[in-house]
């Protein structure tokens, strides 16, 4: 038995760049550029592309054009396009703009949740219960997020039991899958083993996804740990864009290109075309006018410069 023999042969990569990436940009990205970015990502072959957030535009002005973006994207058959929804008001807006999938979100720490959505964890679960009931009634697919599962910028250590309590409750409320977030990129592999191991004692692996930010360079090592434990869905963002405006020190998500490069090398299928993701990243970085966080993307640029010569 090889070290990787338990690793699934096919994985789901959930692209969150248009939402988690663009929510954290200092400036407002024009609506047309957001739509083009999402369309390019759709063409790359992801099964899920998270589009935007129907949150308070005062809280996240970067995504104040959520309706326009969701209405304008070209939907590819078979692709899911979830949007973040914090409350019934957000659900109503999302449904009005044609959402067929949503994501609800809460946290494993009280202080982070208050800063992020101005609710205690218990209160947010009550609000989520109503949102999920309505959303399921309307036939929507629902993802649930739990933030700061591996450490909180306000409270420090987070008990895996707390993560289990919140993730388990989301599943009881009827969400289709739960994404376990390392919001500020503090996790390391042994900790992933401990927390995910605790979850897997009670919850099915196929209902869990892992969402690593790469603030300290540990995201790929953490993915590998999750893979070895039988997790088969991972979130990432094209170019490594991202962060949470309400989590000091949060920087980009794990870069999709870096994740795909590793998975391809390991012979794991995702259905996603790496070159097309690079093209989408090249487009959005041109709009943002800044360098990529993705190491794989940087290597492509270096090769292009080599080929062109000095
Ligand atoms: P609040 O101030 O407590 O709520 O905000 P409120 O009900 O008093 O509403 C305040 C104002 O917002 C009112 O407007 C409402 O009408 C309006 P005003 O009367 O002052 O003009 N409002 C809305 N407007 C549009 N759409 C809505 C909506 N709801 C209220 N849905 C609230 C509470 C939850 C609304 C606010 O705190 C909020 O929107 N927070 C969003 C925070 C956010 O988006 N954070 C980033 C996403 S989470 C993340 O990035 C983590 C993740 O990536 C995983 C990980 O990495 O861990 C998912
Ligand atoms: Mg995130």
Image (spheres, rainbow, N blue to C red):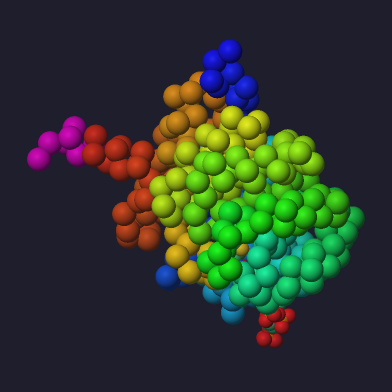
- The image shows residue 193 at horizontal and vertical percentages of 60, 40
From the viewer's side, name the closer residue of 73 and 274. 274
Is residue 244 shown in magenta?
A: no
Residue 92 versus residue 46 in the image, above or below: below
From the viewer's side, name the closer residue of 224 and 76. 224
Q: In this view, does 282 lie to the left or right of 62?
A: left
Residue 135 appears in view: no
Q: In this view, does 158 lie to the left or right of 219?
A: right
From the viewer's side, name the closer residue of 286 and 19. 19
Image quadrant for the N terminus? top right
Q: Residue at x 68, y 52 (%)?
A: 160
Residue 92 versus residue 237 in the image, above or below: below
Residue 111 versus residue 300 in the image, above or below: below
From the viewer's side, name the closer residue of 79 and 167. 167
Is residue 309 shown in magenta?
A: yes
Q: Which residue is drawn at 32% across and 60% down?
A: 289
- The image shows residue 87 at horizontal and vertical percentages of 76, 69
The magenta segment is: 304-310
Q: What is the quadrant of residue 61 in the picture?
A: bottom right
């Amino acid at each position: 038995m090889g070290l990787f023999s338990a690793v699934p042969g096919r994985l789901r990569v959930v692209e969150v760049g248009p939402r988690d990436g663009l929510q954290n940009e200092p400036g407002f990205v024009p609506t047309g550029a957001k739509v083009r970015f999402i369309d390019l990502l759709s063409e790359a072959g992801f099964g899920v592309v998270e589009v935007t957030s129907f949150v308070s535009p005062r809280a996240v002005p970067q995504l104040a054009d959520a309706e326009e973006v969701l209405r304008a994207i070209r939907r590819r058959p078979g692709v899911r396009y979830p949007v973040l929804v914090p409350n019934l008001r957000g659900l109503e807006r999302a449904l009005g703009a044609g959402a067929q999938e949503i994501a609800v979100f809460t946290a494993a720490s009280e202080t982070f949740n208050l800063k992020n959505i101005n609710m205690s964890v218990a209160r947010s679960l009550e609000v989520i219960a109503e949102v999920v009931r309505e959303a399921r009634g309307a036939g929507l697919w629902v993802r649930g997020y739990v933030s700061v599962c591996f450490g909180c910028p306000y409270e420090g250590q987070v008990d895996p039991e707390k993560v289990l309590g919140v993730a388990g409750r989301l599943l009881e409320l009827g969400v289709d899958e739960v994404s376990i977030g390392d919001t500020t990129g503090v996790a390391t592999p042994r900790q992933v083993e401990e927390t995910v191991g605790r979850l897997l004692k009670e919850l099915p692996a196929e209902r869990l996804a892992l969402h690593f930010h790469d603030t300290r360079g540990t995201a790929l090592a953490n993915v590998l740990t999750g893979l070895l434990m039988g997790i088969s869905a991972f979130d990432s963002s094209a170019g490594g864009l991202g962060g949470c405006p309400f989590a000091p020190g949060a920087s980009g998500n794990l870069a999709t290109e870096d994740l795909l490069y590793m998975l391809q090398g390991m012979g794991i299928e995702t259905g996603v075309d790496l070159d097309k993701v690079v093209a989408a990243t090249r487009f959005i970085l041109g709009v943002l006018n800044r360098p990529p966080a993705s190491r794989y993307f940087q290597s492509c640029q270096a090769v292009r410069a080599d080929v062109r010569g000095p």
